[in-house]
Image: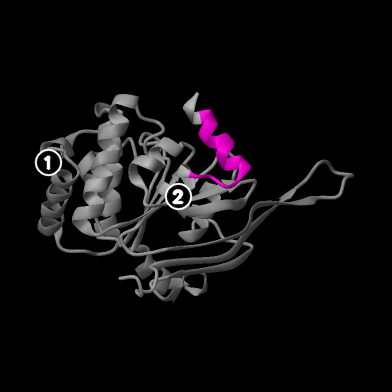
């Protein structure tokens, strides 16, 4: 396993935005992500941790091509993600899925939960109607929900149930990589541990690889095998979670951990 090629390779990723300060002033360029590089092995969970505005969500969105980078490289399972177009990118998206931060805003309130989970199967033409319905029931059970909940609307579900629906939708196409953007930050503390434990169980059962975005080092300690600390668009420290949190070398990392312990 040690010699196996990484599933995800990110090299020198940059995202710049133009900031305009008025009609008579020259526009300036702001780097939201500045020369970010990391690798993620199969079955690993990399926690990308940092405070709000550190560039972690922008990095994750560029990995999935939801945001186009200014420059850099993203390789997934040996394929050049940034070079793909059309059908090639569509096929790749089946292997790379995202779980969003807010389980309320990321679900269509006009669709029943079952239809939300079934939607990726319909879009990608997977199976007939009967097969899709069977797959939806299987996915509900996989994330700890009774298939009878498929008839309910998001407004009729709790926050934890809605996040499980989002997770089931992300798993529908059997991806290799899940990008989870603050997936528990909008949940009650009592529910957060349940969802984190579910993510750990699914990782082990399905052989998933996670890129986990969070501002909370405690979540990284609970779930992640590796960590990269982001500050002002750059990775300032990276390594195994035990090494980085056990003996942080960067001053920003030490401050981040100190904030969480108070």
Residue 144 vertical position relative to residue 32 in the rendered view, above or below: above
Q: Position of residue 107 (x, y in %)?
A: 34, 40
Q: Closer to the camera, 254 or 175?
A: 254
Q: Is residue 43 left or right of residue 26?
A: left
Q: Closer to the camera, 246 or 198?
A: 246
Does the CB distance between marks 2 and 1 fall below 8 Å? Answer: no
The residue lying at 49 percent from left, 56 percent from top is: 66
**What kind of element bears circle 1?**
helix
| Residue 11, visible in the rendered structure | yes
Q: Is residue 5 left or right of residue 126?
A: right
Give the labeled residue for mark 1. 147
Residue 243's disc number: 2
Seen as rendered, the residue at the extreme right is: 24
Q: Position of residue 31 (x, y in %)?
A: 69, 52
**What kind of element bears circle 2?**
helix
Considering the whole magenta stretch, tell me its main secondary structure: helix
Residue 43 vertical position relative to residue 243 in the rendered view, above or below: below
Q: Is residue 122 left or right of residue 211?
A: left
Q: Is residue 81 left or right of residue 113?
A: right
The residue lying at 60 percent from left, 46 percent from top is: 250
Q: Position of residue 165 (x, y in %)?
A: 26, 41
Dot 2: within a 10 Å radius of its alpha carbon, few (fewer than 14), some, or many (20 or more) residues?
few
In the image, which is nearer the foreground, mark 2 or mark 1?
Answer: 2
Residue 136's disc number: none
Q: Earlier in the sequence, mark 2 or mark 1?
A: 1
Dot 1: within a 10 Å radius of its alpha carbon, few (fewer than 14), some, or many (20 or more) residues?
some
Examine the structure image and report whether residue 248 is included in the region drawn in magenta: yes
Examine the structure image and report whether residue 233 is included in the region drawn in magenta: no
Q: Position of residue 210 (x, y in %)?
A: 36, 54
Q: What segment is highlighted magenta in the picture?
A: 247-259
């Amino acid at each position: 396993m040690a010699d196996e090629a990484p599933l995800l390779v990110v090299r020198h990723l940059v995202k710049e935005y133009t900031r305009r300060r008025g009609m008579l002033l020259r526009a300036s360029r702001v780097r939201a992500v500045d020369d970010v590089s990391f690798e993620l092995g199969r079955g690993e969970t990399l926690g990308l941790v940092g405070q709000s505005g550190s560039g972690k969500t922008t990095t994750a969105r560029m990995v999935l091509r939801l945001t186009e980078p200014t420059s850099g490289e993203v390789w997934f399972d040996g394929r050049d993600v940034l070079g793909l177009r059309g059908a090639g990118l569509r096929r790749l998206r089946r292997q790379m899925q995202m779980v969003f931060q807010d389980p309320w805003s990321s679900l269509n309130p006009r669709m029943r939960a079952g239809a939300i989970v079934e939607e990726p199967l319909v879009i990608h033409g997977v199976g007939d109607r009967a097969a899709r319905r069977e797959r939806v029931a299987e996915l509900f059970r996989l994330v700890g929900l009774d298939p009878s909940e498929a008839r309910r609307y998001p407004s009729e579900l709790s926050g934890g149930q809605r996040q499980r629906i989002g997770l089931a939708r992300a798993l529908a196409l059997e991806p290799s990589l899940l990008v989870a953007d603050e997936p528990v930050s909008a949940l009650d503390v009592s529910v957060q541990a349940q969802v984190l434990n579910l993510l750990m169980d699914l990782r082990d059962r399905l052989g998933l690889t996670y890129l986990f975005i969070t501002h909370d080092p405690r979540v990284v300690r609970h779930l992640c095998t590796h960590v990269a600390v982001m500050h002002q668009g750059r990775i300032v420290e990276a390594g195994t979670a035990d090494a980085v949190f056990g003996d942080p070398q960067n001053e920003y990392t030490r401050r981040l951990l100190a904030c969480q312990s108070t």
